[in-house]
Image (tube, rainbow, N blue to C red):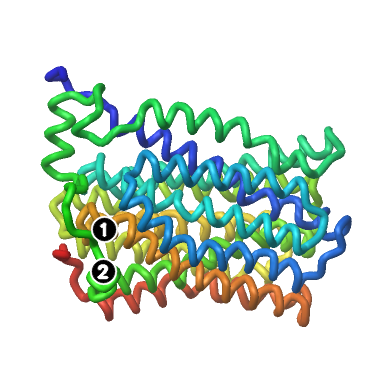
Amino acid sequence: MTRTSSRVRWRILIFLFLATAILYIDRSALGILAPELQVKIGWSEEQYGYINSAFMVAYALCFLLMGRIIDRVGTRKGYALSISIWSLAAAAHALVGSWLGFAAARFGLAIGQSGNFPAAIKAVAEWFPRKERALAVSLFNGGANVGTMMAPLVIPVIVLSSHRWGWGFLWTLPLSALWLIFWLKFYRSPSGHPRVSAAELDLVRAEAEAPVPSPRRVSWGAIISHREAWAIAIGKFVADPIWWFYLFWGAKYLYARYGIDLKGIGLPFFLIYLVSWCLGIGLGWLSSSFLKRGWTVDKARKLGLLACGLLAVPVIMVPHVEKMGLAVGLIALAAGGHCGWSANMFSLISDIFPGEATGSVTGFGGFCGAVGGIIATFSVGKILQNVGIDGYAIPFAVAGCGYLLALLLIQLLVPKIRRVAI
């Protein structure tokens, strides 16, 4: 190892960014193609809700399982397993022709994708000091925005040029295979990486929470006995379904309200997720900058979460505006608030819990977020089936108020953020 400072941790962040981008392309494909598939295959709004609920059920259950697996086998093998499963399941969408078939494919997709964030957060905890974590999380979580931007730009072109909707689910499979090959070749823990310098290793060892091998296993009881774990769970339970709503029903809302079809959906979605990506990075940087100025973790993270929640409030007005440009802008602002919220919530996990528990805690939070998503997707499907387009006012109202409600509950549970011992 050389004495000069290497940048291995930032190269690893590129892998996390790319994997998250691929994940969101695969996840967004159905939402982009839903208006066309609904006509061709003939599912109802309620059945579309069931398809998304199947994803959320598997996502909830497997978040707990994958978080534990990643803590057991390590970040390198756990991430490889995750992307292998979800890539095959994404390709399987091209082979089905009924709403039940899509529900089964979404179930498999969720099994694999449930491992992405536990593995990525564990990698950040292993490689990044605390003052860089919120920024690091916001940067790799930007892959969600890039993937969601690329999906409406690329998928319609592929489908319309090939005249086969199945190719909209198949084209990312080679990308996933390439990522997997380079990931297995490059990723190692900090102490075992051949390219890390002494200076970077000292930085990681001094502040990062690289998991230390231990003969004991962290039990669920040891995790959920802490109020901090429930605070993270509440933050995910309330906020995650809001993102699912944008992802699963965003294109359908623009189609129903403004007549935007498969050819025209690219630009509005590109703008929404470009703006939200930039805002998410800025909000992640905000709490990190507070920490660098000497603020406490409690003050820095909670003020960061408050800023994110306030950005989401105006989205309540989306169903009541006439101009599509204004609606897109309000959704983009709220989506940016969500991205910043997620960066701060994920950073809280490694702020509060030791490294050997980060995968499990992330899985627990993701499970609770997915449970909220199950309730939301089922409810939205029912509302739209019975009320029609006017029913969109209800989920948009929840999307505007949810983050501030979650922050209030977090404050009541954890008046002061502190490091816990397990």
The image quadrant that residue 13 belongs to is top left
Judged from the image, the secondary structure of the residue bearing numbered disc 2 is helix
Residue at image x 25%, y 28%?
Answer: 193
Residue at image x 53%, y 41%?
Answer: 84
Q: Name the residue under label 1.
A: 357
Three-letter code for the amino acid on which mark 2 is drawn: Ile
Left/right placement of residue 6 relative to residue 318 reads left
The image quadrant that residue 169 belongs to is top right
Numbered tag placed on residue 107 in the rendering: none
Crowding at dot 1, Cα within 10 Å, few <14 / some 14-19 / many 20+, comes out as many
Three-letter code for the amino acid on which mark 1 is drawn: Ala
Q: Is residue 285 visible?
A: no
Residue 71 in the image: state x and y as whole percent.
31, 52
Q: Distance between the residues labelled 2 and 1?
A: 8 Å
Assign the C terminus to one quadrant of the image.
bottom left
N-terminal label among 2 and 1: 2
Foreground residue among 296 and 130: 130
Instruction: Find out whether the residues at labels 2 and 1 contact each other: C-beta distance under 8 Å.
Output: yes
Residue 140 in the image: state x and y as whole percent.
41, 42
Assign the N terminus to one quadrant of the image.
top left
Rendered position, 391 above or below 285:
below
Left/right placement of residue 307 relative to residue 419 reads right
Residue at image x 29%, y 69%?
Answer: 220
Q: Mark 2 points at which residue?
A: 223
Judged from the image, the secondary structure of the residue bearing numbered disc 1 is helix
Q: Is residue 171 visible?
A: yes
